[in-house]
Image: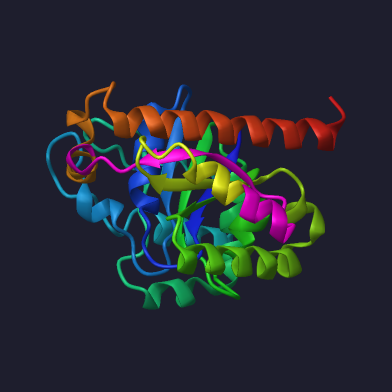
Amino acid sequence: MALYAVCSAKGSPGVTTLVAAMALAWDRPVVMADLDAGGGDLALRYRDERGRPLDQDLGLVSLAALSRRSTTTTPIGPHLQVPLGGPPILVGVARPEQVGALGPAWGPLAQSLAAYEGDVLADCGRVTAGAAVTPVLAAADALLFVVRPTMEELYHLRERLGGLAEQLGSRDMHGRRIAVAVVGSDRNRTGASDVQRLLDASGSGATVVGVFVEDAKGALRLRYDLAGVPARSVVLRSAGVVGSRVRELAAHDLTAATGV
């Protein structure tokens, strides 16, 4: 259906946690794809339905190996694993060194993710200039940047959006496909609007889609136990709002592109 690339411009503001929370709150079939160049965390955090560790050789690495040898788009289904209490996962690399080894497979990988019959939430981690995951960002129906509302992180977000505009082209970066989730407190009523004003002033074209609420207890449970997170927890409710608004942005962009 649609590919959503979730990433950060600086530091570790909680990309993986937001991906997991959005996946649990998603209202249609979805897959979590671990594409973090720093090394995947999803396989380390979760176990399969029998309580066994997820297989780190089955996922991104096995999909890339087939993609290199195939002349057609390789389905991702056979490379997915199902964790206890959560949606399927495409396990990422175990070591950062493996990212470079994937080399030209990133283009076909992006095509495989975009062709999946359900939605894909791709955890792209921190995105730097010339990042290996750039083909995935270009293929995504929407990009979602996660940021804390600090001067440093907002500065790096603005600069990264500008750099991506040069890499991906003006349509991708100045359309309505770029979303921003602000990590913060649900008691801060002005944080998201403040970030939106800054983004508007920079001409990035990005849209703040909501606040991902920092709930330490809920986030800790989510980190290791997908089955144990209450559906009405603040972490899932806030992620659900962010997810629904990102889908609206992607649908708007696809409608404009197809003329439907």
Residue 65 vertical placement versus 256 (above, below): below
**Relative depth, front residue between 175 and 90:** 175
Q: Residue 120: x percent and y percent?
A: 51, 40
In magenta, the rendered stretch is 197-218
**Relative depth, front residue between 51 and 127:** 127
Magenta run includes residue 200: yes
Q: Residue 28: x percent and y percent?
A: 48, 23
Which residue lies most toward the right here? 259
What residue is at 59 percent from the left and 54 percent from the top?
A: 110
Give residue 35's quadrant in the image. Answer: bottom left
**Relative depth, front residue between 240 and 130:** 240
Q: Is residue 139 left or right of residue 220?
A: right
Total numbered badges shown on the rendered structure:
0
Magenta run includes residue 202: yes
Q: Residue 10: x percent and y percent?
A: 45, 67
What residue is at 35 percent from the left and 41 percent from the top?
A: 185
What residue is at 57 percent from the left and 36 percent from the top?
A: 246
Residue 187 in sight here: yes
Q: Quadrant of the N terminus?
A: top right
Q: Residue 148: x percent and y percent?
A: 42, 55
The colour mode here is rainbow
Q: Is residue 63 left or right of residue 105?
A: left
What residue is at 40 percent from the left and 52 percent from the top?
A: 15
